Image (cartoon, helix red, strand yellow):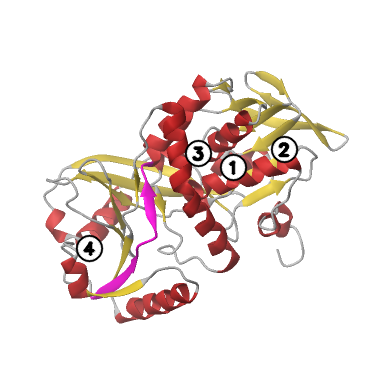
Amino acid sequence: MKGIIIGGGIIGLSIARELNKLGYEITILEKNSLGRGTSWAAGGMLAPQAEGLTGNFLNFAVESREMYKDFVQQIEEETGHEVSYYECGIVCPAFSEKEMENLSKRVDYYNKLGLESKILTRQEILDMGIKISNFVIGGAFFPQDKQVDNRKLVISLVKYAKNSNITVKEFTEVKFIEADDGVFQRVITNNGAFEADFCVLAAGAWSGEIKPIKVFPIKGQMLSFKTKAKNEISKILYSSRAYIIPRKDNNLVIVGATQENVFFKEGNTVSGIFLLLKGLLETLPSKKDYEITETWYGFRPATPDGLPIIGKSEIKNLYYATGHYRNGILLAPITAKLITQLIHKEEESPYLKMFDFSRFYIKGG
């Protein structure tokens, strides 16, 4: 069977890989360079607990987090390219008594679910070797949260796609999707028409430009700096001021991210970078003289309720895998698994009811 994946980010690449391994003839259509959109701009945190997720969505995200070690190992074996996966844990600093109170409630909630969590005093954070500012009064530690170097992961997935029998069409912008009697037929692009037996729309923040589904962009600006020694910052720091992500195998640290509802407005801004630097220095003032190495931005694929859209569409053999908002990197393995099961076995996970596109078009949606 032939399939088309619209979108060459981590979600589309992960789905293409799973389907290719089962013998499907896959074509990826990507409007720019493969893997160089939102997935390249991300931070790479695998952080359902630091994000404060709850309920069934927490279960879904934790399941994907726990798939990550095997997911990365398999990709490394398949490509010979190292992906920097780091089980570093995440510290959430608190800057007020109210934040400490909220973190305490979160820790209690997760501990009751068997998800390891711990409240930290200010001194305990300092004892970790983290030179926090005087503004930080304490925090929480989520040791099961992790990170992956999203750029290395994307490079590996692109390598897999280009070294396999997956057909890759870069700089191929989808204009619209054609159906006949409610059944998917073809995709029309600036480079012609592509026919297949099925199609997966995984175009991230641009999905709503292709189909009228409720996915829209939320811009995020980011920067990176160099520390003077490797592993100078031992944990990810995730707070209301900024998230600070030290990479595993070098002295690079990522700082993010703004959240701006400005549609697809390009470019870094003075105010955006100022907010990141302010958050960094309010957390780790000792880094004030360090070298900034890069600034960049990306567009998260948001939905009205913050949950992704995954599963069947209103057209037979057209599937959605989009709207992952802040958790696209985290949710790539489980999204690929569910979409592959849906296509290959017509097996619908109970999770898909939560992510059905039609939830926005029913009363109260």
Q: Amino acid at mark 4?
A: Thr
Label 3 belongs to which residue?
A: 10
Number of residues whose C-alpha sits closer than 10 Å to that of mark 2, classed few (under 14), some (14–19) or many (20 or more): few
Q: Nearer the viewer, mark 3 or mark 4?
A: 3
> Does label 1 or label 4 sit earlier along the sequence?
4
Label 1 sits on a secondary structure element that is: helix
Q: Disc 1 and disc 3: Cα gap in Å?
A: 10 Å
Q: Nearer the viewer, mark 1 or mark 4?
A: 1
Q: Disc 1 and disc 4: Cα gap in Å?
A: 36 Å
In the picture shown, does residue 137 fall above or below 207? below
Q: Are marks 3 and 4 in contact (CB under 8 Å)?
A: no
The rendered magenta stretch, by its main secondary structure, is classed as strand
Residue under the point 50% across and 59% down: 62
> Does label 1 or label 2 sit earlier along the sequence?
1
Q: Quadrant of the C terminus?
A: bottom right
> Does label 2 or label 3 sit earlier along the sequence?
3
What stretch of residues is rendered in magenta?
137-149
Number of residues whose C-alpha sits closer than 10 Å to that of mark 1, classed few (under 14), some (14–19) or many (20 or more): many
Residue under the point 49% across and 27% down: 160
Q: Which mark is residue 283?
A: 4
Q: Amino acid at mark 3?
A: Ile
Label 4 sits on a secondary structure element that is: helix
Q: Amino acid at mark 2?
A: His
114 or 299, nearer to the observer? 114
